[in-house]
Image (cartoon, helix red, strand yellow):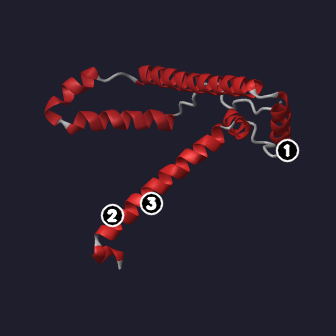
Amino acid sequence: MKYKPFPHRPRPIDFNQRRASAFQRKQNREANALPLFAEQIREQQHDWETEKDARQRRDDACVARWRLREAALWRKARSMYFALPEQDRASCRQDWVKVFRGAWTPTSLIYLIEKYNGVGAEREARMAADRKAMNDRITTYLLSQQALAC
């Protein structure tokens, strides 16, 4: 089956002079917000190098989390796909190539598989029942207030 690889990889952040000056302005704003405690606030603030390291770590961790999430979705999609009967699997594979061309993400595959394993139909039926119940509640409420029903 075709799939679209996850587009993001950990990469070095471009720390330029504009970001450094924005960080310096932020620290100045924090210190000047409470003028009586400006000295104490400045003592607690960290420098630009520490901030760069922290931002890079956060960015790398974020990309790693997203990649793990994407991999888990692919594993889920594959397990759902191989749980289908052979005939449904062939139909699913054909739709994957013809209908979803270029949109080869794990969520697209899960959506397509749910068309064949019945989960999608169950969800649609549940949502239709919820919509009907909501519409009935609204109608009952409107009919109980004759001034609004006109």
Q: Mark 1 or mark 2: which is in front?
A: 2
* CA separation in Å, label 2 and label 3: 10 Å
Crowd around label 2: few <14 · some 14–19 · many ≥20 (10 Å): few
Which type of secondary structure does the marked residue at label 2 adopt?
helix
Q: Nearer the viewer, mark 3 or mark 1?
A: 3
State the residue lying farthest toward the bottom.
150
- Figure quadrant of residue 71: top right
- Residue that label 2 marks: 141
Q: Tell me: residue 132, above or below residue 93.
A: below
Q: Looking at the picture, how far across and down is residue 21, in whole percent?
A: 43, 36
- For the residues labelled 1 and 2, say whether their Cβ atoms are less than 8 Å apart: no
- At a point 25% along the width and 21% down the height, the residue shown is 43
Residue 15 in view here: yes
Nearer the observer, 105 or 150:
150
- Could you tell whether 12 is left or right of 102 in the image? left
**Disc 1: CA contacts within 10 A as few (<14), some (14-19) or many (>=20):** few
Q: Amino acid at mark 2?
A: Tyr
Query: Where is residue 32 drawn, in percent x and y?
Result: 23, 37
Residue pointed to by mark 1: 98
Closer to the N terminus: mark 1 or mark 2? 1
* Number of the label disc, if any, that sits on residue 135: 3
Judge left or right: residue 128 versus residue 73: left
* Residue farthest left in this picture: 36
Instruction: Say the numbered circle drawn on residue 37.
Output: none
Label 3 crowd bin: few (<14), some (14–19), many (20+), radius 10 Å: few
Count of marks, rendered view: 3
